[in-house]
Amino acid sequence: MAVTVRNPAELTLERYFELVRQYPGKKFTFNSRGEIVEMAPSWLHSRKQARVAVLLAAWLDAGALPGYDVGTEALHNLDGWYCQPDVAVQRTGADPGVPTEAPLLAVEVHSRSNTRSELEVKAARYLQHGTSMVWLLYPRTGTLELHVADGPPRTLRGDDLIEGGEVLPGFRVPVSDIFSETS
């Protein structure tokens, strides 16, 4: 049974947590419009999400960006827009419950639950709410679409470098490190 909540009066954290309790075997998230939708992430989605989190955690653990940490699937409330980035780099002082501060970096991994256009809308919404950089990962094509507020999206693949620029100073990883068959 697919569950989607589109009634604006029901788009609350209370309703989200009620669904989680009511359907313990299902996973829910918020789409770009803030609707609560059921997710069905694949093993490939999970592997790429974990790979990005590990790469970012290693970089952060080396002291590259003091005061920030990485997390996965943390629910955020950005001025009333509920979102759950697959991976986020967040200030360590963020609300330990539901952060209301936009992540520095938000990463979304394409899956059956999200169309390409849905992810592009999410990227725009993250940027509108103060996120500095967004990565959209497309595991089937091995591409990463990099979004920043002050420029057009860039598509990276293979040996192209993901460079953090001013957002993640010193971060440089080839796209192939995320999409290699061993990761």
Image (cartoon, helix red, strand yellow):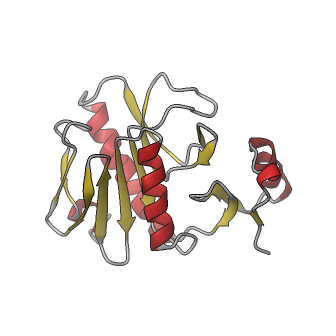
Q: Residue at x 68, y 63 (%)?
A: 37
Residue 116 percent across, percent down from the top left: 45, 72
Q: Residue at x 81, y 60 (%)?
A: 23
Q: Residue at x 77, y 61 (%)?
A: 5
Answer with the quarter of the image where residue 161 lies.
bottom left
Q: Is residue 145 left or right of residue 126?
A: left
| Quarter the C terminus occupies | bottom left
Does 156 sit above or below residue 90? Answer: below
| Quarter the N terminus occupies | bottom right
Q: Is residue 82 left or right of residue 58?
A: right
Taking depth in this image into account, of 17 and 128 the one nearest to the observer is 128
Q: Residue at x 77, y 46 (%)?
A: 17
Residue 147 percent across, percent down from the top left: 31, 54
Count of picture labels: 0
Residue 108 percent across, percent down from the top left: 45, 58
Taking depth in this image into account, of 40 and 9 the one nearest to the observer is 9
Residue 84 percent across, percent down from the top left: 56, 49
